[in-house]
Image (cartoon, rainbow, N blue to C red):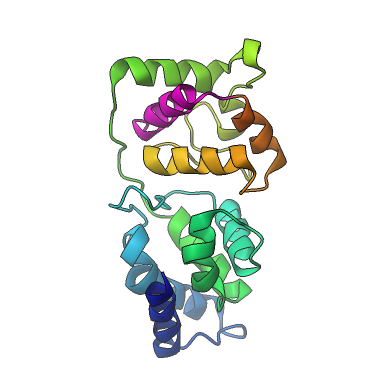
Amino acid sequence: MVVVAGLLALGIGALGLARADAPDPATQAFAQRLAIGICGTCHGPHGNSGQPKFPRLAGQSANYLVAQLKNFRGQTRGDPDAIGYMWGMAAELDDPTIEALAKYYSSQQPLPGRAGDPALSARGREIYQHGIESEGVPACSSCHGPDGHGVADFPRLASQRSQYILKQLASFQSNMRNVAVMHGVAQNLRTNEMQAVAAYLEGRP
């Protein structure tokens, strides 16, 4: 983790980060080089990570990405991977570079997800689209959209890695990621229900 952060620092030095006053096209070009050359180590050069523990960023909401990168930079997102990987990675990013990175990833084409167990995915679809009224769980689709592509500043979840989704739900449940609305939702979900939702979402286009 420290090594990766060190690589980022070296990469930023080599690419010349001081871009607060750079024109937008130059900042965007710099961010693309950063995304492909540094961020791509974990997230893939076009945001379609091949490693289940790291999220896919392709097609993600630009506003959501900006917010998360600023949370990492400000060290206000406290889940273990945020601390171990992203606090160091985001520490030297200025606002224009963060916005350009978000624009780059949001414009990339997400790869299709991987279909999981049909019965598990069917249960996940039911929870995602309709919630679980008896347990006080609202429909995930009310914020993340009926197709999982996100609504407004809520993130895209379609084709996201199930391992990553499960890890984030656990972080919301324990309040390591301090997001009030998701803490309330995750607290009322059983492990098998989380697994079902994650399997459903990974298989979505």
Q: Is residue 106 left or right of residue 139?
A: left
Looking at the figure, which quarter contains the C terminus?
top left
Q: Is residue 51 above or below residue 175?
A: below
| Percent of width and height locating residue 194 | 48, 28
Residue 4 in the image: state x and y as whole percent: 39, 73
In this rendering, the count of numbered labels is: 0
Which residue is most to the top? Answer: 134
Let me know if residue 70 is in the magenta part: no
Q: Quadrant of residue 112?
A: top left
- Say which quarter of the image contains residue 143: top right
Q: Residue at x 53, y 39 (%)?
A: 170
Q: Residue at x 64, y 22 (%)?
A: 138
The structure residue drawn at horizontal position 52% and vertical position 68%, both measured from the top left corner, is 100
Q: Examine the structure image and report whether residue 192 is included in the region drawn in magenta.
A: yes
- Residue 161 shows in the view: no
Q: Is residue 131 visible?
A: yes
Q: Identify the image quadrant of the N terminus.
A: bottom left
What segment carries the magenta color?
189-205
Residue 150, quarter of picture: top right
x and y percentages locating residue 99 in the rendered image: 57, 66
Magenta portion: prevailing SS class? helix
Above or below, 145 against 78 in this view is: above
